[in-house]
Amino acid sequence: MTTSVRITTEYITLTQLLKEENIISSGGQAKYYLMDFPVLLNGEVENRRGKKLYDHDEVVIQDETYVIELAENAEQLIAEAETKKEARAINAKKTVRDDRIKAKKAAVAKARKEARFAEMRKKNRIRSGGFGRSTNKPKGPGSWNSNQ
């Protein structure tokens, strides 16, 4: 018996066909199904679950023939999908560009902040590792308890 499978995209994978025709219930089962049962694609044995099936391809699964056909408005749907894909790509590029700009601004702000702190340390004669400690006071355990 021959069954027509209408698709609204450019292609469908073999796993998607198996799931759509309720031969398997999940994509993870496709690998094992294809190991156990021979599947013919246009007369040749096919065991790749990601194999792309296009318009007019014939797939034979357990004496059942499936013919892949594009739906009537498939060209329109494919064009819309391509437009959406291009828009997503443009948005992704914009996001990457925006992230780079933000990173550059953050680096400039960090450099300004470090320069400002370096200026403050120089002005107040403070070491970089110890805020609030002057370099002219005694250091060490003997001087911690002194009343200076």
Image (cartoon, rainbow, N blue to C red):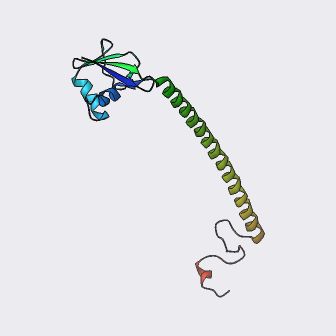
Q: Which quadrant is home to the C terminus?
A: bottom right
Quadrant in which residue 34 is drawn: top left
Q: Please, is residue 117 above or below residue 54 in the view?
A: below
| Residue 41 image offset from top left, x and y in percent | 32, 16
Q: Please, is residue 91 above or below residue 4 in the view?
A: below
Quadrant in which residue 51 is drawn: top left
| Residue 20 image offset from top left, x and y in percent | 32, 30
Q: Nearer the viewer, residue 81 or 111?
A: 81
Q: Nearer the viewer, residue 133 or 68?
A: 68
Q: Nearer the viewer, residue 98 or 90?
A: 90
Furthest residue toward bottom: 147
| Residue 126 image offset from top left, x and y in percent | 71, 70
The residue at the point 22 percent across, 22 percent down is: 37
Q: Please, is residue 102 above or below residue 24 in the view?
A: below
The residue at the point 75 percent across, 71 percent down is: 124
Q: Is residue 89 left or right of residue 39?
A: right
Q: Tally the marks.
A: 0
Furthest residue toward top: 43
The residue at the point 74 percent across, 70 percent down is: 125
Q: Is residue 16 left or right of residue 84?
A: left
Q: Nearer the viewer, residue 40 or 125?
A: 40
Quadrant in which residue 49 is drawn: top left
The residue at the point 37 percent across, 24 percent down is: 6
Furthest residue toward right: 123
Q: Which quadrant is home to the N terminus?
A: top left
Q: Please, is residue 145 above or below residue 118 in the view?
A: below
| Residue 17 image offset from top left, x and y in percent | 33, 26
Furthest residue toward front: 72
